[in-house]
Image (cartoon, grey):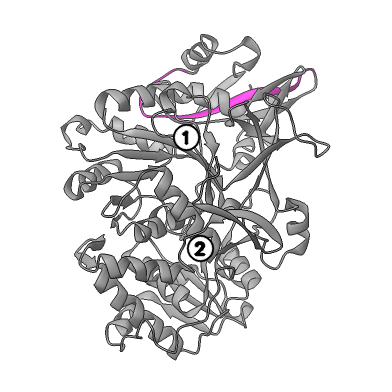
Amino acid sequence: MTDKRFRKEEHHGRVVTCHGDRPTDIFAMFLDTVARAPDAVALVDGDIRWTYATLARRAGQCAARLAALGLVAGDRLGILLDNRADYTTLLLASARLGLIAVPMNIRQKPPETAHALTDSGAVALVYENILADQLPNRGALPDLRLWLPYSTEAALWDRQPVMAADGPQRSAVTEDDPFCILYTSGTTGRPKGAVLTHFGVVTSCLGSRDHLHLRDGEAMVLSVPASHVTGIVLVLMLALCVAGKLVVQRGFKAKQFLEFAQAEGVTYAIMVPAMYKLCLMDEDYAAFDLSRWRIGAYGGAPMAEATIEKLARETPQLTLVNIYGSTETTSPAVMMPLGEGPSRRDQVGRALPYADIVIMDADGRQCPAGQQGEIWIAGPMTVPRYWNNADASATNFTGGYWKSGDIGVMDADGYIRLLDRMKDVINRGGFKIYSVEVENVLMAHDAVAEAVVVGRPCPVLGERVEAFVVAHEAVRDDALRQFCADRLSDYKIPDHVYIVDGPLPRNANGKLLKNVVREWLPPVAAQ
C-alpha cells in the first residue's frame, strides 16, 4: 500500500521519495515550533533556561548582528565552539540569513581548522575565546575577514535590536540550498566537505520524529559534539522539530549525564555504546530516577550484548534503537523498528521509508538477499555533493547513490547487517575476519571499556589479528584471548591483546583512528 505521507520529487537532478507535508527550511521549521509552543523550555545550559520565545528573540538578535557585519546569503560562517546554548542560536541565525554554517570540532588542530576554512571559503569565524592561541595563522587565510571571539559577540547580541521574523532582511533561501558544510573524518586523505541541505536536514528530523514516536515536549541531553552530524541533526535540530527541551553537556561525563537525566526528566538520548556502558559502570546508576527515559538511540559501533542485557535489567522501560547513517546521509538512513532490537542484535535495522538502500558487488550489480557487498544509499537525506571537490563527488556518488565503503548484508525482509568497513576486513590465511565482530566480543568483557582490532601484515598468513583494549579494572591479556576463544572461531582469536592506557585515538568527530593504532604495533621481533 502506498504511504500517502510521501511523494516523488526531483531535487539536484535526482528523483527521491520525500515528505509531502514539510517545512520549507530549517528556520521555517523553527518558527512553526515557536508558534505552537512559545513558553516551552527550549534550552538548559547552566544558569540559562530559555523558552522558545526567548530563543527566537536571541536568534533574531544574532541574525541582526551578523547582517550588520555584512554577511549575506551564501556566505560561509565557521563555527568553532564547545557545546553551548548559543550553538543553536548561531545555526538558527545562519539559516535565517541563508548563510552556510561550517561547524568544526574544538578538538581539531590548527591545520585541520585551516583546511575547513580555506576549502569552504569561509568569510567569518566565531570561535571560543579559550581557543584563540590554537587558531590558524591569520595571514594564511586572507579571505577570512571576520575573526569573532564568542564572548564578545554574545555580549553584543544582548544589545542588538531583534530582526523581525518576517522582516525584509529574511533570506529567500530555498530548501535545496546548503544549510551547513560538515567535513568528514579524513581518516584517509584530506577531509571532504559534505553539503547538508535544508531539505535533507528537515527530512531527517521528520523521519526520526516519526520512527522514534517522538512528540512535543521531549527532553534530551546534548552529550555528543554539537559540531558532529549526530549532534546537529539528531539532537539540536530534532529538538527544535519536536519543541523539545535540550540540556547542554560540555564533554560527556557519565555521572553528570545521569544527574541531568534525573533532574530534567530526560525521555530521549542518543549516544555511542561506550557512553551507555560508562553510565552503567557508575556505582550509583541504580539510585538515579530514570523512569521517564523511553528511547535510547545509539550508533557508530555495535553495542555489546552484556550492555544490552544490563540496560534491560536496570532500566526496563528504555527501548534501545540502533541507528546507521553518516555525514553523507545527513545522519539516519537505517533504524531498528521499536521493540525489535532484542531479537535482532546482529542487525542495525531497516531503511527509513524514504531511503533507498542497495547492496552492490564489486562490478556495480545489486546483490541478492543474503549476499554481502558494499552498502549504497540514496534518498532525500543523501547529500548532493562534496563542497569544492568535483573529483571526490564523482568518485563517491553514482546515480544519486552514495557509496558508503561499508560491507553489509540485507535479508529478504530488508533488515541490514553491518559487517565492517571495506578497508578494515582482515584476511587471515584466506579467511575473512570482520574486525567489528572481534571488537564486539572484547567489549562484552566486564573489564573492557574500549577495544579496537587491526590487521598486521604476515608473510605466511597474509594478516594476523591484533587487538588493543582499554580496561577499567585489572585483567590479563591471556584472559581476554581465552574470552574470545570461548566465543569465536579459532582463526578470529587475536594473536595478541595489548592493554593500553585510554582513551583510544579518535579524530575530532570521535571516529577511531585505526591508522594511528597500527603505529602502536611493536616490531615483530619484539613480540
Any part of residue 108 in sight: no
> What residue is pinned by disc 2?
104
The front one of 443 and 384 is: 384
Q: Give how far across and how far down residue 386 sits, in percent.
A: 67, 61
**Callout 2 environment at 10 Å: few (<14), some (14 to 19), or many (20+)?**
many
Foreground disc of the pair 1, 2: 1
Callout 2 amino acid? Met
Q: Residue at x 73, y 51 (%)?
A: 396
Secondary structure at badge 1 equals loop
Q: Residue at x 29, y 78 (%)?
A: 57
> What residue is pinned by disc 1?
336
Secondary structure at badge 2 equals loop
The front one of 461 and 345 is: 345
Vertical side of 80 occupied by 293: above or below: above
Q: Is residue 23 left or right of residue 314?
A: right
**Quadrant in the rendering for residue 412:** top right
Q: Looking at the rendering, in which quadrant would you find the C terminus?
A: top right
**Magenta segment, which residues?**
460-476
Any part of residue 129 in sight: yes
Q: Is residue 416 left or right of residue 277?
A: right
Magenta run includes residue 462:
yes
